[in-house]
Image (tube, rainbow, N blue to C red):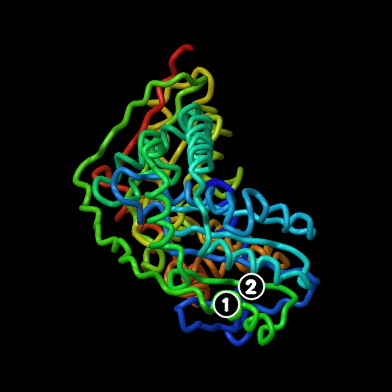
Amino acid sequence: MHYIKAIFILILFCFPIAADAEEIKEYTLDNGLKVLIIEEHKAPVATFQVWYRVGSRNEPAGKSGISHLLEHMMFKGTSDYGPGVLSRIVQRNGGIDNAYTTKDYTAYFELLSADRISIPIDLESDRMQNLTFEPKEVSSERSVVMEERRLRYEDDPQNFLFEEVVASAFKVHPYQRPVIGWMSDIDSIERKDLYDYYKTYYSPDNAVIIIVGDVRAEMIIEKVKESFGDIPAATSPRRDITSVEPEQKGERRVLLKKEAELPSIIMAYHTPNFPHEDSFALDVLSMILSGGKSSRLYQSMVYDQKIALDVSADYSGFNKDPYLFFFSATAAPGSDINEVEKALYIQIEKIITDFPSEREIQKAKNQIESSFIMGQDSIYLQAMKYGIFEMLGDWRFIEKYLEGIRGVKADDIVRVARKYFTDYRRTTGILIPTKK
């Protein structure tokens, strides 16, 4: 039930090719709740998902991490079901449930036999409106999240460096805050903070339900209306995100001294988000640079020069606002991190001066599209696909993404590399190992 970057990347790259528009039934209830239903009759299973348009970008100052903590509280009971009961009911019926929080949204899901789909409908309806926020549960779960932060970030040198780089790259936009929150902010979140946040953002007019599986749309929508139709829309005004990150005018550098075995580096460049016309070329470029052991970065820095243990280029345009393109590497034992940094610059310059070959480009496109196909039989990933694009504005953006990837040319890749990989757009973080 925690946000894990690797899982998020899996969701983005392992969903299937879009279903035809006529196969997707779309409904909007009187209270503003949007419902997408995709009938998939290959197996007698179904997934029920509720997506809320709220993430760390919506959090008030001084309360970073409240979205993630609220996700935890959604499993801590309502007036009808006590702490953990929802998950036990789903598991007793042979299903699984989970949730995760991102910068832009929070998603909850159940996966179980199709003939028991009414179970999560009732349970999700109940916790959309009836969380109790028992003080002892708030206190306990706040401590759980603080420990999670300590283990996953403050005691993990690479993750801690990542946080520091992102926080330095953004000066105004709320993307500067980690999804899990800063430790002091988490510690300050009280029951009233959570309750007010819940009543503001967890309402049908701020949610989307997605159902995929062996169901009949005309029957299941009646059950959804019965369970969710009487829940009122929110009355509290929501925080409108109007912050626009000012253009970065020079490189920012972060030096982090922390107990670690080896030095590492993260470089972040400001880049646009999907569906900006440059996002497709950036996506293909990241695959050319870092799409497996035959990619440019791995071949040069790990295999040939042997100066890095691992190296990657990571871009995801699936954010509501512009985000970052990351380069990262861990130095091999005995290697100088400064040489690793220089080697990354050389690889960036090669992209700009030497056009990637048609073979490289086609291979990258094939990798992206084959990842789509690999998720063809997963109803869970189908639902996640539609949810992600709906959170970006419209699930129909899926086809625009595929068309954009297929249309990328060599000069597009060189153009975006020249445009965005400049020193004044860059924030660099260096992990300097210290002894225990």
Question: Is 375 situated left or right of 421 in this image?
Answer: right
Where is residue 172? Give x, y as percent: 24, 49
At numbered mark 2, what does the secondary structure look like: helix, strand or loop? strand
Residue under pointer 1:
36
Callout 1 crowding tier (Cα within 10 Å): few <14, some 14–19, many ≥20: many
Pointer 2: what residue? 211
- What amino acid is found at the position of numbered circle 2 in the picture? Ile
The answer to whether 96 appears left or right of 1 in the picture is right
Q: CA distance from mark 1 to mark 2?
A: 6 Å
Q: Residue at x 65, y 78 (%)?
A: 38
Q: Is residue 25 above or below residue 168?
A: below
Q: Pinpoint residue 238: horizontal percent, then vertical percent.
A: 32, 64
Does label 1 or label 2 sit earlier along the sequence? 1
Q: Is the residue 261 above or below the residue 44 in the image?
A: above
Do we see residue 69 in this rendering? Answer: yes
For mark 1, give the secondary structure. Answer: strand
Please report the residue visible at 19 percent of the width from the left and 46 percent of the height from the top. Answer: 249
Residue 379 in sight here? no
Vertical relation: 336 (above or below) 129: above
What residue is drawn where x is 47% and y is 72%? 204
At x 66%, y 65%, the residue is 120
Residue 353 screen position, x and y as percent: 36, 50
Q: Are marks 1 and 2 in contact (CB under 8 Å)?
A: yes
Crowd rating for badge 2 (residues with CA inside 10 Å; few <14, some 14–19, many 20+) = many
Q: Quadrant of residue 168?
A: top left
